[in-house]
Image (cartoon, rainbow, N blue to C red):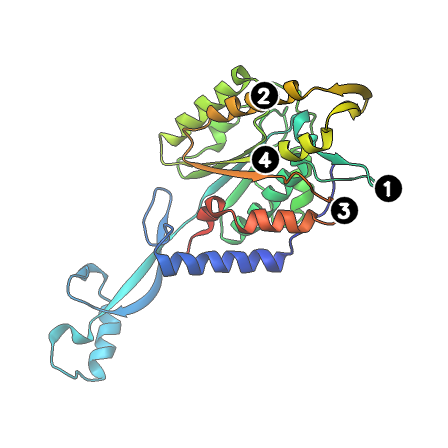
């Protein structure tokens, strides 16, 4: 079981959140000044009234104080002061993690202790990072196993995030596609983040695609993050006879056929096409050569901080 601590400090995540807020204010991106379903408006600042502003937001008390300080030009509205509000964005963030066996790869056996950077480990780190930021912004966050059993989907708490995420995703992923809890979890103002390697037959993935299309039809935000370790895995497989450790930890002698690898790549491409209708998608790809004893932190930090699709949910001033 993967149990490596998050390679990103809380200070770095807070800096990332603040940088996202600055980007939102400087570019006008994000929905921090737009009223949405499930939001309330909270006071932000006083600003001088300008012609064309909504007179309902004039603060009469503040305007009277400004008038008492004197008018320079005698224009009636010169000393009027408006209240500016911002939407108090509070979202329900649902992170669905693929827990199947294919997410346990790739692996590296470094002695004296095995060290892994599997897709499943990265998925857990990703949820922990997202939860850290979103909880600090007042959102609620829950974790859902795409192929899980009857795990709790209670909202995460700020203390002991890693332990909560592990507890709610601690299964072997051998259950059927687990979409039923989403009926309760996906409120109208929710953000649904799906983390998967998409390694499954199309007929197994189609119900998930249908559920995503249904969610996208409403006001929900849906983000798919594909974890793609195939370039690294193919490079590690090489060609010819190899001893391969399977998902059940058994080692088998396998002859690596390049035609079979090409077939696998074609299957991956076909599975990826099923999700082309998703507007917001990210592709996290392992490089062919990757020293997991050295590059773990750099890989995750780079992927996370440079993922502009994922950053959209933090663009709130």
In primary-sequence order, the first of circles 2 and 3 is 2
The spot of residue 19 in percent (x, y) is 49, 59
Element under disc 3: loop
In primary-sequence order, the first of circles 4 and 1 is 1
Furthest-top residue in this view = 203
In primary-sequence order, the first of circles 3 and 4 is 4
The spot of residue 77 in percent (x, y) is 15, 72
Name the residue tied to disc 3. Answer: 293
The answer, for residue 180, to whether it is visible in the render is: no
* Residue 261 to residue 38: above or below: above
Element under disc 2: loop
Name the residue tied to disc 2. Answer: 200
Quadrant location of the C terminus in the rendered image: bottom left
How far is the residue under mark 4 from the one under mark 1? 26 Å
Q: 19 or 251: which is nearer to us? A: 251
The spot of residue 300 in percent (x, y) is 63, 47
Q: Residue at x 35, y 61 (%)?
A: 43
Name the residue tied to disc 4. Answer: 227
Q: Residue at x 56, y 48 (%)?
A: 304
Q: Residue at x 23, y 61 (%)?
A: 57
């Amino acid at each position: 079981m993967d149990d490596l601590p998050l390679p990103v400090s809380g200070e770095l995540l807070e800096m990332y959140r603040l940088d996202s807020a600055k980007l939102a204010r400087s570019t006008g991106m994000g929905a921090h000044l737009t009223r949405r379903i499930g939001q309330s408006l909270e006071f932000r600042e006083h600003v001088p009234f300008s012609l064309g502003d909504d007179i309902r937001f004039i603060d009469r008390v503040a305007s009277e104080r400004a008038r008492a300080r004197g008018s320079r030009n005698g224009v009636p509205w010169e000393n009027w002061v408006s209240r500016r509000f911002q939407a108090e964005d509070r979202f329900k963030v649902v992170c669905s993690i693929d827990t199947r066996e294919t997410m346990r790869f790739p692996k590296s056996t470094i002695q004296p202790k095995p060290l892994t950077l599997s897709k499943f480990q990265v998925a857990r780190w990703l949820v922990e990072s997202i939860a850290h930021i979103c909880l600090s912004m007042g959102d609620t966050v829950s974790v859902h196993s795409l192929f899980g059993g009857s795990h709790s989907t209670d909202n995460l708490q700020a203390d002991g995030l890693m332990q909560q995420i592990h507890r709610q995703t601690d299964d072997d992923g051998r259950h059927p596609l687990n979409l039923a809890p989403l009926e309760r979890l996906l409120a109208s103002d929710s953000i649904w983040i799906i983390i998967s390697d998409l390694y499954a037959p199309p007929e197994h993935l189609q119900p998930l695609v249908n559920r995503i299309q249904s969610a996208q039809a409403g006001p929900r935000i849906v983000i798919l993050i594909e974890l793609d370790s195939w370039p690294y895995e193919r490079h590690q497989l090489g060609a010819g006879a190899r001893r391969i450790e399977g998902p059940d930890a058994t080692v088998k002698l396998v002859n690596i056929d390049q035609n079979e690898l090409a077939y696998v790549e074609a299957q991956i491409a076909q599975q990826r096409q099923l999700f082309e209708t998703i507007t917001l998608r990210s592709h996290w790809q392992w490089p062919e050569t990757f020293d997991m004893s050295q590059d773990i932190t750099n890989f995750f930090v780079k992927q996370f901080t440079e993922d502009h699709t994922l950053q959209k949910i933090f663009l709130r001033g």
